[in-house]
Amino acid sequence: MTGKTPSPPSKPQVIRPSSVRSGTLGRVRRSLEYRPAMAVYAVLLVQSLMASGTHIVAKIIVREVDAFTLTLVRSVIAAVAMGLILLIRGGPIRLLREERKMVLLLSFLAIPVNQFLFLFGMRFTTASNAALLYSTTPILVLVFSRLFLGERLTGVKVVGVVLGFVGVITVVFERGVSASMEYLLGNILIGFAVMAWGLYTVFGRRLIIRYGAVEASSLTLIIGTVMFIPMGIVPALRFPFETLSPTSWMAILYLALITSVLSYFLWYFALGRAEAGKVALFANLQPILTTILAVLLLGQEVTVAFVIGGIIALAGVVIAQFG
């Protein structure tokens, strides 16, 4: 005996089943909420890589196939694919009479203007320039929404718009006006293509809300392809398709199916499961990813003017989006 009074035995800790369940369920719930979010971001990253690859692939294939033939073949393949998807989803949509003229306008903007000028311009400019110009679409949407729909622009968004245009002008004229007229022409053609896409986004919003993104886009793609047939059929009939390598056909299929179909669906899949602002941020990654791919795969040189103009333009886009 030590002479010390033994301390009373400690009271055993009672673990209540309810607390265990609530704590475990909370961790499981947080884990389940985290995983879908990460899955959406992974989808967005894949989609951004696909979209960035579009500019690289286009730059390669326009060296072999003229823009008229390439636009027609790409659009026909994509239209067939989207048409099949449209049939699976329930068949063609029934337009209201007053919507028909708008659908014709959107179809014209989508294929004969946007896609054709994009491929035509890619022959003369760089992949990174095209990606940067397309990344300014949100700025053009703000401007066109103000001009045609009367939507209000805040002061912060105006600052973003101005910065965006300053950055774009810096990139478009990075080599001067007379240094390479073909290079300047390519940038201008891509600029008009982006303007057409901005108008398509603004005017097509109501149609997409009424009928759905897949249905409305499929319809304009199919009609736009039909519109382009008179422009592209003669060059396509004269083109020696037998000279194309399997790699060239893979590039055409990439533009038709990966860019126009799969990448499109991944974008709207993510848009339906994440905040639009977060989705838009991933779109702003595309010029960066395209530039990295262009340097690695095409040996493109990045100028100081491009870097400065790109930073200013992307800053303007972010400010305009979230201002």
Image (cartoon, grey):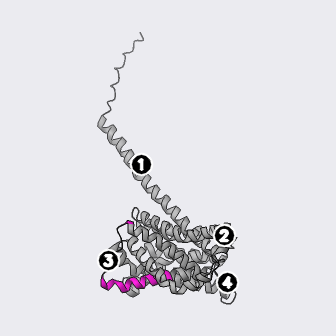
User: Which badge, 1 or 2, is on the more N-terminal residue?
Assistant: 1
Q: Quadrant of residue 251?
A: bottom right
**Nearer-the-camera pick, 170 or 6:** 170
Q: Looking at the image, is mark 2 or mark 3 earlier in the sequence? A: 3
Which residue corresponds to mark 2?
245
* Mark 4 / mark 1, whichever is N-terminal: 1
Q: Position of residue 120 (x, y in %)?
A: 59, 82
Residues at marks 1 and 3, CA–CA distance in whole angstroms: 43 Å
Amino acid marked by disc 2: Ser
Secondary structure of the residue carrying tag 4 is loop
Cα distance between the residues tagged 2 and 3: 41 Å
Residue type at mark 4: give it. Arg
Q: CA distance from mark 1 to mark 2?
A: 48 Å
Locate residue 13: give its quadrant.
Answer: top left
Q: Look at mark 1 in the image and give the residue it sits on.
A: 31
Is 131 covered by the magenta stretch? no
Instruction: Kindly tell me whether residue 239 is visible in this rendering.
Output: yes
State the residue position of label 3.
94
Which residues are drawn in magenta? 88-112
Label 4: which residue?
175
